[in-house]
Image (cartoon, rainbow, N blue to C red):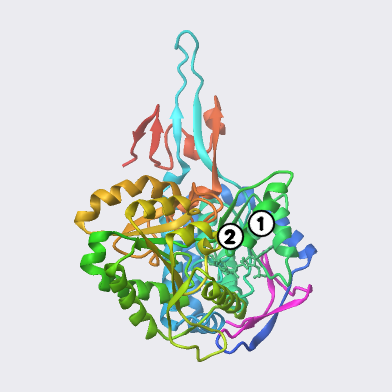
Amino acid sequence: MEISGDLLIGKHTVRGTNGSIKGIDAATGEALAPAFGGATLEQLEQACALAWQASDIYRELPLETRAKFLETIAQNILDIGDVLIERCVTESGLPRGRIEGERGRTVGQLRMFAAVVREGDFLGVRIDPAQPQRQPLPRVDLRLRYVPLGPVAVFGASNFPLAFSVAGGDTASALAAGCPVIAKAHSAHPGTSALVGRAVQKAVADCGLPEGTFSLLFDSGRDIGQGLVSDRRIKAVGFTGSRGGGTALMKLAAARREPIPVYAEMSSINPVLLFPHALKNRGAAIGKAFAGSLALGAGQFCTNPGLVLAIDGPELDTFIEATAAALSETPAATMLTPGIHKAYESAVNKTAEHGEVKTLARGCAAKGATQGQAALFSTTAEAFRANPELHEEIFGAASLIVRCPDLATVLDLVEQLEGQLTAALHIDEADYADARRFLPALERRTGRILVNGFGTGVEVGHAMVHGGPFPSTADGRSTSVGSLAIDRFLRPVSYQDMPEGLLPDALKTANPLGLNRRLDGKLQLSK
Ligand code: NAP
């Protein structure tokens, strides 16, 4: 499949005429062919109009059609073959094995959502049948199902060019919910976006769906992305990126005549808490594993462990020595974009120069212009408390260890933290009682609490929460990974005293779709 540099507006392949964007070879910084034409406001208008036209048709298609569509996207992505892997490796600088794994995750997510759609539980059907004889007043017939919000704008992530981009988790869950998607391609991987976009566009045609079910736009500035969020026909936004970008889009969405939800994943430092017995018994082993998690993917994970809280003493020193030894042998790694590399370097230098911070270790020196060198810092509890800038995310392989006098101080610092995607507890059995006291504070602040591991592996499943209070995400009541992500793009509607002939199939008394449902509050399984 060739990369044309064109926009995908419904079934059309159109040249954008509003400036141009080029992909960059992450390792060399060289511009890659072809140039991608940025969309004009007229082209944005066309994509939104088509999405709106598609919306009411797409959402009422049989669930089987929707499920097959998701599976067809998955197959079409696989059918692109090596061209996709190669382009993605070049644009992202991520190793081939990682990108192949990410393609597997992308395809797996689409298939998981196909299964969710077929099962139909996401429709949340509830029926409270009429009780005409009820005293003192008769009860009306009430039936509830969840309906899709309408067209969704998706801003993919730079650090997951497949699994969280054009056909990634946000797109898969929005399409599964019954929402058309307009994807705004990330400027860090336009070629990857174009290839995947074509696979989705082809799936729309293969499955005979309305053409506006999917469009892909390139933006040479900010107008198209912002115009998309402001367009009256867009009803929700999925975003992964910086805190600045996410909050800018949240403000735009809130200022609309009809404000809409923005599901933005932004910044998180993912605290690691080392409890005394675990630290004493396994400090060196935890340190080695921590260094591995910190440096994975050049540290460019939203769940990267950017903060360690522990009691100061010889046990913590053992942990630090093991971490430092492992990091000092960790090769520098190519970062996603020159911009992300520059931001990393600047944040690391600023931290290293901070009067209250000590540099404990650095990774191997960079061999290329955009390679990030891992960094490990330490500070005291008082300094961490007094300097809010030390709580900020450094996107890359950098982490700060806070030396605390006791566990009460660790808990107090947890209470000072902003919202987080994850918190990792390293505990042995003798630490359980102490760990239990931390749970309420961690539940208030994080989406996922994990034990004796690190947050960097995010399982795509039914019980996963990849979300958390602000600023880790814009709305901590949801998850962007796992099957529950579909809920972000749905809302409940009740139908009162609606004749059978008018009811959607999902709510008909005879249950023609074979759905699980709540009848008079009691769960009724279809099989
Ligand atoms: P970014 O600059 O926020 O870009 C994300 C997307 O939003 C891109 O498509 C970008 O467009 C667009 N965008 C950004 N600001 C915008 C604005 N004001 N108006 C309209 N569109 C806007 O983030 P990034 O460079 O991809 O990622 C780097 C940062 O994201 C890191 O520093 C890290 O903090 C954060 N990050 C967080 C997570 C997480 O899950 N929490 C994951 C990855 C990254 P262009 O492509 O045209 O720039």
x, y (%) of residue 78?
A: 46, 75
Q: Residue at x 45, y 46 (%)?
A: 122
Element type at mark 2? strand
In the rendered image of this protein, does residue 80 appear above or below residue 519? below
In the picture, the disc for residue 249 is 1
Q: Which residue is mark 2?
A: 239
Rounded to the nearest angstrom, the CA distance separating label 2 from label 1 is: 9 Å
- For badge 1, the amino acid type reads Leu
* Secondary structure state at the residue bearing disc 1: helix
Q: Are marks 2 and 1 in contact (CB under 8 Å)?
A: yes
**Residue 339: in magenta span:** no
* Residue labelled 2 has its Cβ within 8 Å of some atom of ligand 1: yes
Q: Earlier in the sequence, mark 2 or mark 1?
A: 2
Q: Quadrant of the N terminus?
A: bottom right
**Hey, which residue is sitting farthest bottom in the picture?**
367
Q: Is residue 214 above or below residue 234?
A: below
Whether residue 275 is visible to the viewer of this picture, yes or no, is yes
